[in-house]
Image (cartoon, rainbow, N blue to C red):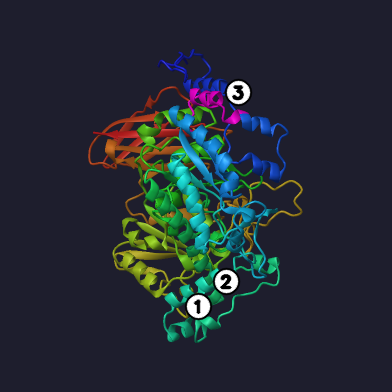
Amino acid sequence: MKTSIDARDPMGEKLSATSNQTRWQRLADSKRELAKDVVWLTHEPLVFLLRRGGHYDDEVERYKRMYEPGNLERMAAAGVRFGRVFFYKGLGLEYERPFMEQSKRAAEIMHKLGMKVSIYMAGTMFVETLYREVPEAEGWEQRDQNNRWVPYGGQTFRHYACPNEPAYREYLKRILKIGIEELHADEVAFDNLMLQAEPKSCRCPRCIKGFREFLRRRYPTKDAVMRRFGLPDVEWIRMHEWDSPQQAENINVLDDPVLQEWVRFRCESLARHVRDLYDYVKSLNPKVVVHINIKGLYCFNRYWTAAVYHPLYAGHVDVLSFDTGGYDAQIHPATGALISQIRSYKMARLLKASCDARWDDLDVALHMAFGVQTAVPGFVGTPYLPNRFTPILEFFREYLDRYYIRTENVADVAVLRNWPSMAYSINDTWAETTLVEQVLIQHKVPFDLLHEEQIDRIGRYSAVILAGQECLSKEQAERLLDYVRDGGNLILTGNTAMYNEWRERRRSNPLLPARKEGKGSIIHIPAIIPGTPHSIVPGRDEEPEPGQTLRKGRRMSPQDWVLPANHREICKTVLESVPNGLSVTTNAPLTTVLELVNRPETRETIVHLVNFDQQSAPCPIDVSVRRQYDSAVVSVCCFSPAKDEPAKLDFRESQDRVTFAVPATSMYSMVVISHK
């Protein structure tokens, strides 16, 4: 079908209409043609590639062409509005200053061309260059239990700096000042901000001293210290020493109170380091976007392994990176598990942070559906995959400002994760929580993901789910009971509330047995039974038995995200706990996911549908949405990168609901419900 609008390429020339391509495809093709000779920007300086090895033989020549004005002009002509330049890799300010000057000249050209500039800030120290330039930097290192430096993977010439060292942070601030005041950076992208897993956690004198000060603040009296540790003073405490890396890797629960406190101290130390850098950037220019690569929310305990607890970054991050391998959107070919970053997006929405998009089109579709597209005014929309041109990205770029910013998601249910349950269980609680969330995702139950810092928000949900949240304080249990008395429905699974906040076993569970309580009720699901893979990896020694896909104590991976064997019973329990029905219902298959959002300024409700099954496009999909505004519906339109123009859908209003059928969704559809 021919396009009905006068589409133009980035050079302003009219695009020819064809019968077998959408305007999005033609626009993407046009941009790719314009960009075919572009040497794309990189955040890595040439000297790093030469030192690391493993690069192409024409790398030096490529770098010469990268910052040439003509190359940057070709980028702008192709519609690129954002680029990240190398700035500071950790080799030392004076050593990298000539390369900063190269980036400065490029940034000037990019700004004149209407492009936003992101500068890269690494979090490691190069011992061969930085230590010559700043000898005292050797004292800034992280040190493990054997007083050994902590390297960046196999790159032993790169060491991690301790986040509790203020001199290192002040050094970074000197560099940031150059980037913001001389390069006029629009974004600062921080990388490698993490602590290492045991037994490589930092045990330097700074950290040990800071840990004891941390414990004194939390347990200020002798009686408090004695109750927590069985010792009269925190000075008596000695840190756990590991016999081997395997001993640390094989631990499944943290019962040792010192290790319990240690994981919190590490998380707070790293977050404090990041918050200080964030505040410094904003003090120089509050419009600068701060991008932090602390990654997303996965199915294993990153509090323990990487010292990352996302709620501690609330108000101190604008954009997050989700660049951990193995989480690309797909239906896993061996197990049938539906893999996505949806949990990470829900966590980011909690922080009101945007996220950088992944490369694959299916990941882009999820980014459009679940991502928060609001970082800093005037900057939103420019960072997303600047050197990639596909129909779905062109669709996103065109409609970004109109439909994707300033939205609020709709949720009927909340999944509550509390600190001790998730922090002190290395694997099992994470597996149970992940599987329950997987049920909600695939059954398209609108839900929010909350941490204990947001427990006061639970009153806005019809049901709150605690999946294996085994450690609850007395105060949290009472808060949840108040929620039930006020009419909320609490759904517990497994061993929820079996322990107190220190993982001390209770003689009686304050939330069980399941019962009616006031206006609401407590429902208990005894077990989340792991499902069976749809197919088996070729060459596997043995087939897993039903219900034995995930062994207790084993670290979960995305391929294990097979729906539980009792997923329909779990979903039924959730639905029965939402007495007025879900805000959106659909007959879409389990391989399609959905997100429901409102856009208050235009009085629109938007339904995002993402189809993971690229072998089939379910058609039609019936959808019923509770009316979100107190006025009549004017229109229901379906937008898709598979079509040039939105299609007006027939709809029916009945009481407080709007019902319609969505045409075939090959990968992504957006339905906009407009109210008077």
Asked if residue 477 is among those painted magenta in the image, a careful observer would answer no
Residue under the point 53% across and 58% down? 168
Q: Position of residue 618 (x, y in %)?
A: 50, 34
Residue under the point 47% across and 45% down? 178
Q: Position of residue 203 (x, y in %)?
A: 60, 69
Give the label, 2 or 1, closer to the camera: 2
Residue under the point 49% across and 31% down? 393
Which amino acid type corresponds to the residue marked 1 in the rendered image? Answer: Glu
Q: Quadrant of the C terminus?
A: top left
- Name the foreground residue: 581 vs 9: 9
Which amino acid type corresponds to the residue marked 2 in the rendered image? Answer: Pro
Q: Which residues are magenta?
A: 65-82
- How far apart, in angstroms, are the residues tagged by discs 3 and 2? 53 Å
Q: Earlier in the sequence, mark 3 or mark 1?
A: 3
- How far apart, in angstroms, are the residues tagged by discs 3 and 1? 63 Å
Dot 3: element? loop
Report the side of 34 relative to 513 (left or right).
right
Dot 2: element? helix
Q: Which residue is mark 3?
A: 37
Q: Is 373 located above or below residue 311 in the figure?
A: above
Q: Which residue is mark 2?
A: 205
Residue 663 in view, yes or no: no
Give the label, 3 or 1, closer to the camera: 3
- Name the foreground residue: 643 vs 530: 643
Corner quadrant of residue 220: bottom left
Dot 1: element? loop
Q: Position of residue 338 (x, y in %)?
A: 56, 46
